[in-house]
């Protein structure tokens, strides 16, 4: 897989190692990436990705590739980027919504989402500084939003019954 981030080309090879592709064609290994969770997120000119229990980021250099934060479970999922904030979830029961600006110190829980799951194929959408995303619960789907604060996070509409995660993504807002 190849990912371009502002002119820096990242390549994930067959062994799941993260490389930078230089203009001369040379590949520089940045990180062995054995627990890849796809897709990564491009934000703030950096590549953010889940590696096992950790959220990591890279600017395309070894020195600029590191861990944002490590958690106690494998359920990490990057959601999206909005208004300077990277959103992600952890846990299953309850599912927790987190935010970070890319540093350990800024990483915090925004809301408890209950026993909902965020579908693995979710595509969150930024609309004027608010992130919209779908949550699945008991065969139905809820449309949620967050502005990065607890008070600004919650369901917009609930109970879209019979929709799968493939048809309920808020991609056409």
Image (tube, rainbow, N blue to C red):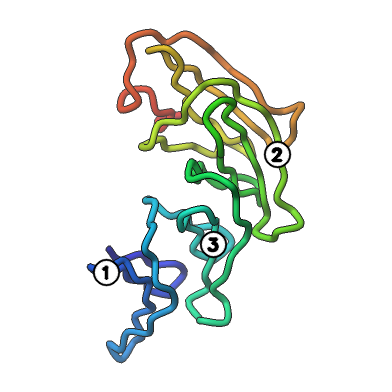
**Looking at the image, which residue sits at the far front?**
72
Residue 172: where, in percent of width, then height? 40, 30
Q: Is residue 119 left or right of residue 46?
A: left
Quadrant where the N terminus sits is: bottom left
Residue occupying the far left of the picture: 14
Q: Where does the image place residue 113, in percent across and percent down from the top left?
A: 60, 25
Image-based side of 27 in relation to 171, left or right: left
Q: How far apart in space, not on screen, are marks 2 and 3 (Cα)? A: 17 Å
Marking on residue 56: 3
Q: Quadrant of residue 87?
A: top right
Quadrant assignment, res 122: top left
Where 88 falls versus 6 (above or below)? above
Q: For residue 167, which quarter of the picture?
A: top left
In terms of sequence position, does the residue under pointer 2 or pointer 3 come before the other? 3
Q: How far is disc 3 from disc 1 in space, using C-alphas?
A: 18 Å
Q: Is residue 135 left or right of residue 155?
A: left
Residue shown at the point (39%, 57%) measured from the top left: 35
Rendering coords of residue 140 (x, y %): 41, 12
**Image height of 91 relative to 47, above or below:** above
User: How would you rate the neighbour count of disc 3 (Cα within 10 Å): few for under 14, some for 14-19, many for 20 or more?
Assistant: many
Element marked by disc 1: loop
Q: Residue at x 74, y 30 (%)?
A: 150
For marks 3 and 1, the one nearer the N-term is: 1
Which of 75 and 56 lies nearest the eye of the viewer?
75
Which of the pair 47/52 is nearer the observer?
52
Q: Which residue does the numbered mark 2 point to in the structure image?
A: 109
Question: Which residue in the structure is indicated by mark 1?
Answer: 15
- Total numbered circles: 3
Secondary structure type for disc 3: strand
Classify mark 1: residues with Cα within 10 Å, few (<14), some (14-19) or many (20+): few
Rendered location of residue 51, percent (x, y): 46, 58
């Amino acid at each position: 897989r190849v990912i371009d981030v502002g002119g820096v080309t990242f390549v994930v090879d067959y062994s799941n190692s993260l490389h930078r592709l230089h203009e001369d064609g040379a590949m520089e290994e940045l990180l062995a990436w054995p627990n890849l969770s796809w897709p990564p997120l491009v934000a703030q000119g950096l590549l953010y990705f889940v590696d096992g229990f950790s959220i990591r980021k890279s600017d395309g250099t070894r020195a600029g590739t590191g861990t944002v934060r490590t958690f106690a479970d494998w359920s990490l999922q990057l959601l999206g980027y909005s208004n300077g904030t990277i959103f992600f979830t952890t846990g299953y029961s309850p599912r927790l919504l987190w935010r970070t600006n890319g540093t350990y110190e800024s990483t915090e829980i925004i809301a408890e989402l209950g026993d909902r799951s965020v579908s693995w194929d979710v595509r969150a959408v930024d609309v004027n500084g608010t992130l919209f995303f779908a949550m699945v619960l008991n065969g139905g789907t809820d449309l949620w939003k967050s502005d990065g604060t607890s008070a600004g996070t919650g369901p917009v509409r609930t109970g879209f019954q019979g929709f799968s995660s493939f048809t309920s993504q808020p991609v056409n807002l």
